[in-house]
Amino acid sequence: MTRTRTRTRRSRGTPGTGGPRTARAAVTAASALLLAASAAVPVQAAAPQKPPRDGESVLVFSRTAGFRHDSIPDGIEALRNLGEQHGFTVDATEDARVFTPGRLAAYDAVVFLSTTGDVLDKSQQAAFEGYIADGGGYVGVHAAADTEYDWPWYGGLVGAWFDSHPHIQPATVDVEDRGNPATAHLGTAWERTDEWYNYRSNPREDVHVLAALDEGSYTGGNMGGDHPIAWCHEYGGGRAFYTGGGHTKESYADDAFRTHLLGGVRWATGAAQADCRPENGYRALYDSGTGLGEWKQAGPGHFEESDDGTLNTVGGMGLLWHGTELKGSYSLKFDWKMAGDDNSGVFVGFPASDDPWSAVDNGYEIQIDATDVPEKTTGSVYGFQSADLEARDAALNPPGEWNTYEIRVEGERLQVWLNGTRINDFTNTDPARSLTDGHIGLQNHGDDDEVAFRDIRLRPLEPAAGGTSRQGGRH
């Protein structure tokens, strides 16, 4: 039996309303009246209010004050269909009067669907800033980056403003993060046709890039070979996801793009978790391009590689360990997924050995296990220290979905981050288990345990004055 995951919902209710659900109920009637008012203009027609659900609620906003994309109705319909299939409600409008603190409180995320130009006045902008500050979600699609150029806060939210575009054409999208729900379904390269935006600045230092364009695969890219096209980040108290795709009507009929959009919505609403901190300076220890040349297998169990660069546990007890001994401070990141109530873990700080028990006896295991006692479940330093279970539960995606670990070793301090949230902070005091040097390894626990790993990457951390460490670049 697997443990039921509980997710902490944001509290965006106004004082005295009794929390988000009460606040949502209080504004439903007002929101319905306002949304219905836009029905007089066909392109601004609002969806009728659906019966209340125990799920997320999303507002799709598609007002344009510049170029208008003829794919907007297709995008609205696609989002409505995704909501019906995945348990979130969708309201659609082009009436900016919905941007008030009370009305926005009804929604877990707001989608700017190919908006253009100046679409909100000062009071509406202030309301949206307050909504994000209270934990609201933002999803920007395509021309959302061609919006509100005179509103610096919005430029930070979307990540980068539109500059230009070539003609519609096929291109290769390099998928950089396959742990995020918006890109986990994709391979390392995504071939698709769209109108590919150039941006006025490269957002990479401030956002977590999910996918980037291969400028050699099409004509008209002008960002010097580093061309982010989809990203996420936490901003101003809330969550922001942006995708540059979605110009064409065909995008919204394409299953891969629809799943991409769905993942962005789920993360923005808080229904799915991911590490959206900026990430730079890592080198691959294992991905679809590196192979297992530097890795060694100890014990009878082993790992099988799939075509997309995923390592899957097979057979009995074993340890797949990397041959490079790590000294000093480092950040280790990787994505993992369980099929159900399975058991695995990642070891750090153990000596080279053909015996998988050497890692158990001489290192530390960061556990992956859906059900066990606190010091032996997901996020624990196995047998030594439990994770912060409340933080862990809020950050954890359930079996069947990908999660991202960061294991950060700084001297004898070991920190564990799950999907961007720190859930464990442990200090070693045993000289026999020193973390200052040693190897890393992936555990294959048993015959019936199905755990997958991919995109294992490492970055050294530079020591700072006083003997601690600092990150070698933005995270």
Image (cartoon, rainbow, N blue to C red):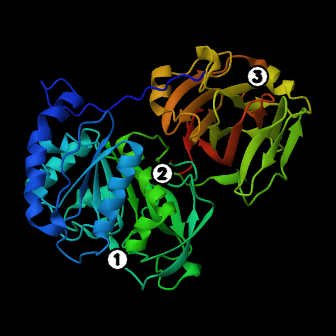
Query: Mark 2 to mark 1: distance in Å?
Result: 23 Å
Amino acid under label 3?
Arg
Q: Please tell me which of labels 1 and 3 falls first in the chain.
A: 1
Q: Please tell me which of labels 2 and 1 falls first in the chain.
A: 1
Q: Which residue is mark 1?
A: 163
Query: Mark 1 to mark 3: distance in Å?
Result: 54 Å
Front-most of residues 455 and 400: 400
Asked if 397 appears above or below 111 in the picture, the reply is: above
> Taking the image as drawn, is residue 206 in sight?
no
Query: Mark 2 to mark 3: distance in Å?
Result: 32 Å
Q: Contact, CB < 8 Å: mark 2 with mark 1?
A: no
Q: Secondary structure at mark 2?
A: loop
Q: Secondary structure at mark 1?
A: strand
Tell me if 120 is positioned left or right of 320 in this view.
left
Front-most of residues 15 and 467: 15
Residue 246 placement: quadrant: bottom left
**Few, some or many residues within 10 Å of mark 1 (<14, 14–19, 20+):** few
**Viewer-side label of 1, 3:** 1
